[in-house]
Image (tube, coloured by chain):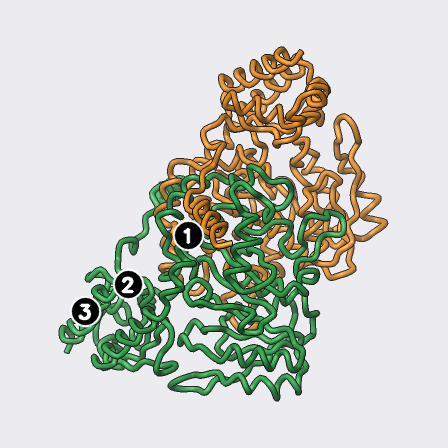
Chain colours: A orange, B green
Amino acid sequence: MEQKSSKSLQKLSELRRQHKSLINLMPLQTGGMLTDAAREALIEFGDGYSVCDFCQGSLCNITNPPIQEFVQELLPHFLGCEVATITHGAREAKFMVMHSLARPGDSILVDANRHYTTFVAAERVGLNVIEVPNSGYPEFKIDVNEYTPLIKKHVPKLILLTYPDGNYGNLPDARRLGEIAQEYDIPYVLNGAYAVGRIPISMEEMRADFIIGSGHKSMASAGPAGVLGMKKKWEKTVLRKSGTYSNKEIELLGCSIRGVPLITLMASFPHVKERVQHWDEQVAKSQWFSAALEEVGFKQLGEKPHRHDLLYFDAPMLYDISKRVRERGYFLYKELKDRGIWGPQPGLARSFKLSTFAADRRQLGFVIDSFKTILNKYS
Amino acid sequence: MEQKSSKSLQKLSELRRQHKSLINLMPLQTGGMLTDAAREALIEFGDGYSVCDFCQGSLCNITNPPIQEFVQELLPHFLGCEVATITHGAREAKFMVMHSLARPGDSILVDANRHYTTFVAAERVGLNVIEVPNSGYPEFKIDVNEYTPLIKKHVPKLILLTYPDGNYGNLPDARRLGEIAQEYDIPYVLNGAYAVGRIPISMEEMRADFIIGSGHKSMASAGPAGVLGMKKKWEKTVLRKSGTYSNKEIELLGCSIRGVPLITLMASFPHVKERVQHWDEQVAKSQWFSAALEEVGFKQLGEKPHRHDLLYFDAPMLYDISKRVRERGYFLYKELKDRGIWGPQPGLARSFKLSTFAADRRQLGFVIDSFKTILNKYS
């Protein structure tokens, strides 16, 4: 026991990441790779509560480092909203909005492509979740007009749209849903965990009441970190203050990301603000890559033409191989890793998700060639 | 506007911390300074979701890095509990326990020295908070026997004790309260945000149902990070799984600190586990320092003899000075900073809190001399 414990402790003092220098196509990770500025800030503010040196009682009012300016000026402008705050992540933002706007037993309406945490956040509040179905195989599209009859039927406390979803990278008509939400006067939450920080997006243009972003997924930030933007009219509901501590927001338990993920979010922000201007190049790159993999014989699911870097492929030939090799589904992970590529979830070969966001065309060309080589090797 | 925005962005790309290399006496910070191993891990796992490379659906079951072993073996052993998990911090742990064990309108019983977040977490759930008073000036002690009549009167859903509190560093009789909790069969939450990682402590020995620790406050971790230990019998209540996603804990929204604070918590753990063995040296150092500052003319509030590194001083002479200098209360912060010392909250001089945890006796001797010099300078 003592020996085992000593071995376990030894492991903790030498933590290493196997995938650090590989070409990264992992959908959860390509938008969260740190900038150099964020990497420096990580060390500068790594110690415990060091962002709170000059706290006067409220995280979002700290002026050194300039958290106040970031949260109260830069973020609202970037998100196209009136009021913004920072959260532990997109799921925590969803929970705080649901917990503020709905009561146990209430219903909410969400798209069927929503992240699992949309469901779990609702479960934590005790809500009934009604889903707007997608179009099924192969595109799995959400038609936002289908919200209308379900709004009439269930009178939900809020509606939520995932833009894009994390499986297929589909971008439903968020603006049209904003019109529907206004028509029926229902609070509208736009979950942009894979949009904010990648795509130029404005809550106001989408006519949403709330917009949610993820620092680690799409804003070049360490995990966990998120942002939440809203209309001014919701500030008193979602950011309501404690009855006893007048500068503490109840839903944030006083302060949310009181530490280094916030600093990386801030340090990367100038880069993130700039990079969304090049979104059209990202879309062109993704379409080019998808077409090349379809030529190899994989089938891209989700919308076509595709308008996001998140891609889902069916790969029956890889599945056939996995059935006859020793490593089973892990053979794909291993073959790609041997070539310096990291992307599909280890163990999956039949279908897999990739993101082209962080790799350049030269690297993606190498990925395409690698898939060809792997198929040839096992044919 | 454009010019202002560009200046704001420039500031974000060069974030610097003024207090980084000073002697640190800041109570919120002395237990959260990173180890060298944690500093390396910070860079290694800084990118977004990089701890999740080998996730199979549950953060606490990831084996590479060895999160599973840390959370399921090392932590329970360290905390003296049966089941452990990781949280965004102590306040989030308090909220999840309250949210799981009580319903809106229920009452809970807490010590009057509790952190403000104990109150705000209860407010978020909708609970009535009843406080066990302290003994008032100058010791502000909690007599845990006073929980008994209030338990009888209010039948609370849980009781909570802050051990020690963050103001005075008082250590009430947590073990005796455990006996009371067992006698009345009431769930007992021990908030050890300033104990776990500093003091050898065992939930089981204290006869508590839950124990809460803070990574950034006391476990040499980046913020925000926390730990929650519990008796096995509470696992199904507090760590209940989603009805739809059977591997996702509802109160954690699936996963809690899915990022770099967790990695620093793990990387520092071997050091933290070792350092609690030297707690008696910490107490002796704190008592020596407190006695020396009392000789200078300050008055230490809270328990005497003191048994923790958190110290609260009344300093009427400094207050007198602050009334006649241009910098007002900030003069103390400035004078100390000029001498390479960082501790009292900027702006406070009448009374202030310090922690002797991170400084050695030579450094603390310099701090004592500096206070003498400052008093002489303005006398």
Q: Which residue is mark 3?
A: B370
Residue A88 seen from this side: yes
Which numbered disc covers residue B359?
2
Amino acid, disc 1:
Ser
Pointers 2 and 3 within a single chain = yes
Instruction: Classify residue B375 as left or right of residue A140.
Output: left
Instruction: Classify residue A181 as left or right of residue B377.
Output: right
Q: Which residue is mark 1?
A: B268
**Residue depth check, mark 2 versus mark 1: number of the one nearer the observer:** 1
Q: Secondary structure at mark 2?
A: loop
Q: Residue at x 68, y 54 (%)?
A: B250
3D distance between C-alphas at marks 1 and 3: 32 Å
**Residue depth check, mark 2 versus mark 3: number of the one nearer the observer:** 2
Q: Quick check: A207 above or below A24?
A: below
**Counting residues from the N terminus, which is met first, the one under dot 2 or under dot 1?**
1
Q: Quick check: B293 above or below A205?
A: below
Q: Residue at x 79, y 31 (%)?
A: A136
**Counting residues from the N terminus, which is met first, the one under dot 2 or under dot 3?**
2
Spot occupied by residue B191 in the image (x, y as percentages of width and height)? 52, 69
Task: Please rate how many residues cluster around mark 2, counting C-alpha atoms within 10 Å: few if below 14, some from 14 to 19, many from 20.
Answer: some
Spot occupied by residue A320 in the image (x, y as percentages of width and height)? 72, 19
